[in-house]
Amino acid sequence: SVTFIYPYWHVFVTSISSPDVAQSSGFKLWPKVFSLDAYRQMFMTKTLWTGYKNTLIVVAMAWSVSISLNILGAYSLSRRTLPLRGLFTGIIITTMFLQGGMIPTYLLVRKTLNMGNTYWAVILPQCISVSHLVIMRNYFMNLPQELEEASIIDGANSFQVLIRVMLPLSGPMIATISLWIIVSNWNAYFNCLLYITDSSKYVLQIIMRRIIQTDSKEMTSAGEAADQLSTDTVTLRAASIMLATIPIISVYPLLQKHFVKGVLVGSLKG
């Protein structure tokens, strides 16, 4: 636990320390000279809020598309009456091992589909994960088949069975997959790096990457008010890391009990 927690705590202490203390080497358990100037300067940075806005848009769109497509695909593959179900499942699982590669994917998204500089270029290439699909399929297969049969006898069609019977019983599984989708899209930056050239559509991770890899003060320049703050590259980088990780870490405790149950139940049956 210490090996996982301390590096995060070290970055946090660095972000709330004065520049002189932050630049000193050694273990930091508590800030010797407390300072929030790094956070004040980050909050005055327009690009930070642009990154937050774009990331929230991408996460919301990606969650909506991904959870819908995964549910539809997983429920279809879980039905024993689906013709060629084994063949379809095998083809989908094969994509976990055989992929087209980065260059063909780039040409498809950027040239053929013409989705450059759009949110869809970041979302669609990874909207369906085979591992998520398999877990959801296994979860649906574990639900009592008698529920579906009773619903069909009462006159329900496949969509009504899915929406009114299966989904209300699938809260833990949906919460688990939702957490994975949100975290992966919150941390994603590579697709944005490939397909987005308009800086007004950069996601948060791209903004943070530029702050960490380039001159932090230049990236976070916010006018005369920022020049009066006592900050340096080290404290700004630490503050940027904290601002990028705190929101997504705060989501996990809300879904933890569903997360554990969903993973266990979704992995029982193949």
Image (cartoon, rainbow, N blue to C red):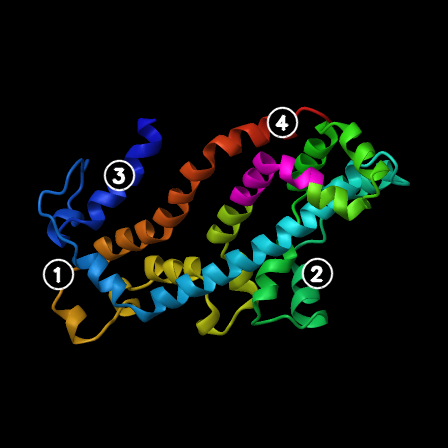
Is residue 172 in the magenta section?
A: yes
The residue that appears at 80% across and 45% down in the rendered structure is 158
Residue 98 shows up from this direction: no
Q: Quadrant of residue 208?
A: bottom left
Q: CA distance from mark 1 to mark 4?
A: 52 Å
* Residues at marks 2 and 3, CA–CA distance in whole angstroms: 41 Å
User: How far is disc 4 from disc 3 in space, using C-alphas?
Assistant: 34 Å
Q: Is residue 179 visible?
A: yes
Mark 4 highlights which residue?
Answer: 265
- Which numbered disc covers residue 230? 1
Rounded to the nearest angstrom, the CA distance separating label 1 from label 3 is 21 Å
Residue 81 on the magenta segment: no
Q: Residue furthest front?
A: 154
Which of the marked residues, 2 or 3, is nearer the chain's N terminus? 3
Rendered location of residue 112, percent (x, y):
72, 70
With 136 as the anchor, is 11 left or right in this view? left
Work out whether mark 2 precedes mark 4 in sequence or the reverse, and give the earlier one: 2
27 sits to left or right of 99 = left
Q: Which residue is mark 3?
A: 9
Question: Three-letter amino acid code at disc 3?
Answer: Trp
Quadrant where the N terminus sits is top left
Which is more foreground, mark 4 or mark 3? Answer: 4
Q: Amino acid at mark 4?
A: Val
The residue range painted magenta reads 165-180
The mark lying in front, picked from 2 and 4, is: 4
Going from N to C along the chain, the mark reached first, 1 or 4, is: 1
